[in-house]
Image (tube, rainbow, N blue to C red):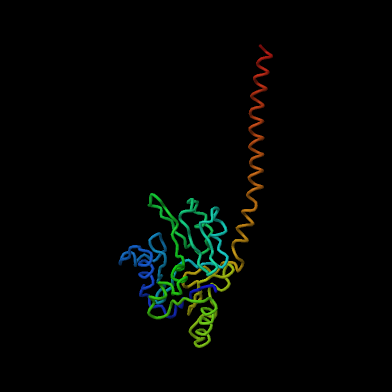
């Protein structure tokens, strides 16, 4: 059964317990300075963002059909049957196509490392395999972030909206965006007011990336033919000049 997460902005108090738990789980540094960095980075795989009196979270959305996986030429990124999109640094060649392909801008890169890796939330894949919730949802004191089976998370989102319809914007973010994700958002206001991209297509991105990638062989072939032609013409001219010079002498 596929896993998912529900983040309810109406219950978030901005305590950043999710950030701290995530950093501890990954063995990353965390202090007041890092807490104040409201952006994802190689040393901060989830972040709480402030929007006046409201808060939102950022982390890998673990798309149902991830664009990052579709563009990775070596299989360093994989979508598991359980839901998490995981990363294998041993396979990574550092092309960083995944950074460009992610519609949510979540993967980061260790630019200052001598052996750089891509860094991203892996949805606590190891914890979820063991039947545990994600570290961030376990740490949340208000149930603003919860995790579990996908169907259960969707049911809980709909239950909350039905019980207090006046407190929620009538939509679940992540349900349809780019073919659906494993992280769902609830909000009291339109999602763009929380900094979420509301201009994304409903279609999965791999179909779009494949449409572009499928043209690469023909473009490469055409380029090879063109370069061969240029090479032949250039050298043919040189041969003609040599022959003409010999005849004149």
**Position above or below: 90 against 163:** above
Q: Position of residue 13 (x, y in %)?
A: 38, 78
Q: What residue is drawn where x is 66% and y is 43%?
A: 222
Which residue is rendered at x = 67% and y = 18% of the image?
A: 243
Q: Nearer the viewer, residue 148 or 16?
A: 148
Task: Identify whether 2 is placed above or below 217.
Answer: below
Residue 71 x %, y % = 56, 56
Image location of residue 176, percent across then percent down: 58, 72
Q: Viewed as shown, does residue 225 lie left or right of 60? A: right
Is 145 situated left or right of 64 in this image?
Answer: left
Q: How many marks?
A: 0
> Up-down: is 163 above or below 201?
below
On the picture, is 63 further left or further right than 43?
right
Q: Residue furthest top?
A: 249
Instruction: Name the residue rendered at 38%, 61% in the picture.
Output: 43
Which quarter of the figure is the C terminus placed in? top right
Residue farthest left in this picture: 32
Image position, residue 225 (x, y; %):
67, 39
Q: Nearer the viewer, residue 36 or 118?
A: 118
The foreground one among 130 and 141 is 130
The quadrant of the picture occupied by the N terminus is: bottom right
3 vs 65, nearest the viewer: 3
Compared with residue 152, is residue 107 higher up or lower down, i.e. above or below? above
Residue 59 occupies which quadrant of the picture? bottom left
Given the current orientation, which residue lies at the most extreme bottom position?
Answer: 163
């Amino acid at each position: 059964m596929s896993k998912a997460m529900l983040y309810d902005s109406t219950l978030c108090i901005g305590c950043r317990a999710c950030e701290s738990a995530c950093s501890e789980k990954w063995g990353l540094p965390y202090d007041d300075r890092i807490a104040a960095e409201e952006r994802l980075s190689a040393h901060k795989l989830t972040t709480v963002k402030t929007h006046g009196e409201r808060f939102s979270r950022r982390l890998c959305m673990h798309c149902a059909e991830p664009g990052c996986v579709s563009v990775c030429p070596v299989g360093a990124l994989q979508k598991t049957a359980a839901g998490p999109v995981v990363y294998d640094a041993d396979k990574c060649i550092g092309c960083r196509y995944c950074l460009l392909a992610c519609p949510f801008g979540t993967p980061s890169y260790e630019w200052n490392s001598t052996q750089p890796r891509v860094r991203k939330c892996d949805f606590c894949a190891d914890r979820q395999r063991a039947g545990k919730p994600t570290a961030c949802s376990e740490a949340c004191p208000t149930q603003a972030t919860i995790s579990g089976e996908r169907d259960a998370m969707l049911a809980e989102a709909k239950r909350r909206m039905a019980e207090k319809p006046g407190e929620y914007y009538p939509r679940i973010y992540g349900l349809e965006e780019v073919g659906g994700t494993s992280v769902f958002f609830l909000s009291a206001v339109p999602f763009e007011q929380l900094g979420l991209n509301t201009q994304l297509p409903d279609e999965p991105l791999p179909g779009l990336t494949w449409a572009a990638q499928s043209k690469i062989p023909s473009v490469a072939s055409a380029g090879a033919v063109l370069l061969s032609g240029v090479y032949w013409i250039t050298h043919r001219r040189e041969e003609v000049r040599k022959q003409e010079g010999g005849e004149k002498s």
